């Protein structure tokens, strides 16, 4: 059974930091590219950051570039998102996604909530 379980969300003040984690099971994690996406209330889900299966290639949305860092640990079947200098616009539900070779399979987690407010 495939599972992606996110954690690490919470309430943080503007300028603060959070690290999100996503633990995967039920598939060969090291074969999958991983990404983080977020969805604010009333808005569409949007891409935040991605990392290749071996962790050598990363890609960021403009809004995340320079403030967020995605990483993975294939030995722990985990992907992380370090978020710094958080802004109110960063608030939302954050989801991790696994994308298999060729893009034929995709799995999503249930999300973890991030709130940025003073």
Image (cartoon, grey):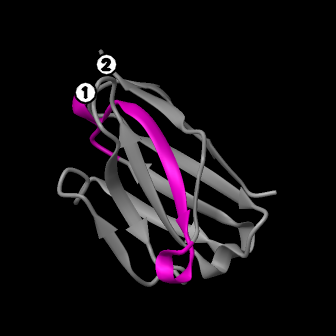
- Residue 88, which numbered label? 1
| Quarter of the image where the C terminus is located | top left
Callout 2: SS: loop
- Residue 48, which numbered label? none
* Pointers 1 and 2 in contact (C-beta within 8 Å): yes
**Magenta residue span:** 84-104
Residue 114 in which image quadrant: top left
**Residue that extends furthest to the top in the rendered view of this protein:** 118
Residue 101 in the image: above or below residue 96: below
Q: In 3D space, how far apart are the residues under numbered discs 1 and 2 (Cα atoms)?
A: 6 Å
- Mark 2 Cα within 10 Å, few/some/many (few <14, many 20+)? some
Callout 1: SS: helix
From the image, tell me which residue sits under label 2. Answer: 117
**Residue that extends furthest to the front in the rendered view of this protein:** 104
Q: Is residue 105 left or right of residue 117?
A: right
Residue 39 in the image: above or below residue 80: above
Residue 35 in which image quadrant: bottom left
Residue 19 in the image: above or below residue 35: above
| Quarter of the image where the N terminus is located | bottom right
Q: Is residue 42 left or right of residue 29?
A: left
**What residue do we see at 54% from left, 35% from top?**
112
**What residue do we see at 49% from left, 83% from top?**
102
């Amino acid at each position: 059974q495939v599972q992606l379980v996110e954690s690490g969300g919470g309430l943080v003040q503007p300028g603060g930091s959070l690290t999100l984690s996503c633990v995967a099971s039920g598939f060969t994690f090291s074969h999958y590219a991983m990404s983080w996406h977020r969805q604010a209330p009333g808005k569409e889900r949007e891409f935040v950051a991605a990392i290749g299966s071996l962790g050598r290639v990363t890609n960021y949305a403009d809004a995340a570039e320079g403030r967020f860092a995605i990483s993975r640990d294939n030995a722990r079947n985990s992907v992380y998102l370090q978020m710094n200098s958080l802004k109110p616009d960063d608030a939302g539900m954050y989801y991790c996604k696994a994308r298999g070779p060729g893009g034929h399979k995709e799995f999503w987690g249930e999300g973890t909530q991030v709130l940025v407010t003073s």
